[in-house]
Amino acid sequence: MNLAYKYNETNTISLNFEDIYVGSLILVNYNHQLNNIAIEKNINLINLNDEIKLEKTSINNLLELVKVSKIQNKLAFVSGFRNYKEQREIYTNSLKGKGFEFTSKYVAFPNHSEHQTGLAIDIGEKRKFIDFIRPFLPYDGIFEKFRKNASLYGFIERYKKNKTHITNIAAEPWHYRYVGFPHSHIIYEKDLCLEEYIELIKNYKFNINPFVLKYKCFEIEISYLKYDSNNLEINTNNIPTTVSGNNIDGFIITQWRNCNGNL
């Protein structure tokens, strides 16, 4: 299984308890730590450059986003995937050098960091000196197009200033998280943070009352399914389907139809 999602064009998808903890929509924050065993077993990391790795689907979409936004020569990739040891060292060094108040705002506690999922990337404007913890990424100029395009390629600005009271992380204009399309599009259009989106989708139950998004020639159904048994098998009715765990208690299911019915 690819970390980003389970995908199937056949009639059934089998899920187990571990699948709750993997996927492009897992919520990793102060209250929900990641499952290291599940992540390490399922993650598919590839090199972005000599120093940075990301989950494969995230990289492919990120490189296309950068290309379309025409900022290849202006953008610096600062930090991608980190293992537990690396996150612990960053957290500890920040405590020693910057203190608790700064660290609690900008550095996640080990196993509570999105960087350990391989789905998060810190980016900044190319400069002679780049702050590793807080790289500079402006909202205007050539980077404005990047920000506007991001949701079309599955990325969201994860920590916005107006969502700090929910995320418990200070505004980080440089931190982008891959959640996949169309989720990124909905989050962007409704001005949500990931915490809010996870809660929103819980209102739309699988095979009962899905959230329906009409986008171009597609009708996309998004729904929630709570995990309540040792093994779970869902019927997709042969509709192309992606499934992600939410890292809490169940799954977010996305099904794609064209304007004339099934894909």
Image: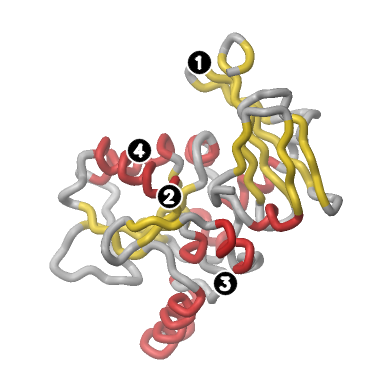
Which residue is label 4 attached to? Answer: 148
Corner quadrant of residue 46: bottom left
Type of amino acid at the residue the image marks with label 3? Asn
Q: In terms of secondary structure, where does tag 2 sit?
A: helix
| Crowding near the residue tagged with mark 2, few <14, some 14–19, many ≥20 C-alpha atoms within 10 Å | many
Type of amino acid at the residue the image marks with label 1? Cys
In the rendered image, residue 81, in percent from the top left (x then y), is placed at: 42, 64
Image point (47%, 54%), residue name? 158
Which residue is label 3 attached to? Answer: 111
Q: In terms of secondary structure, where does tag 4 sit?
A: helix
First along the sequence among labels 3 and 4: 3
First along the sequence among labels 4 and 2: 2
First along the sequence among labels 3 and 1: 3
Q: In terms of secondary structure, where does tag 3 sit?
A: loop
| Badge 2 vs badge 1, beta-carbon distance below 8 Å | no
Q: Where 56 sits versus 116, above or below?
A: above
First along the sequence among labels 2 and 1: 2
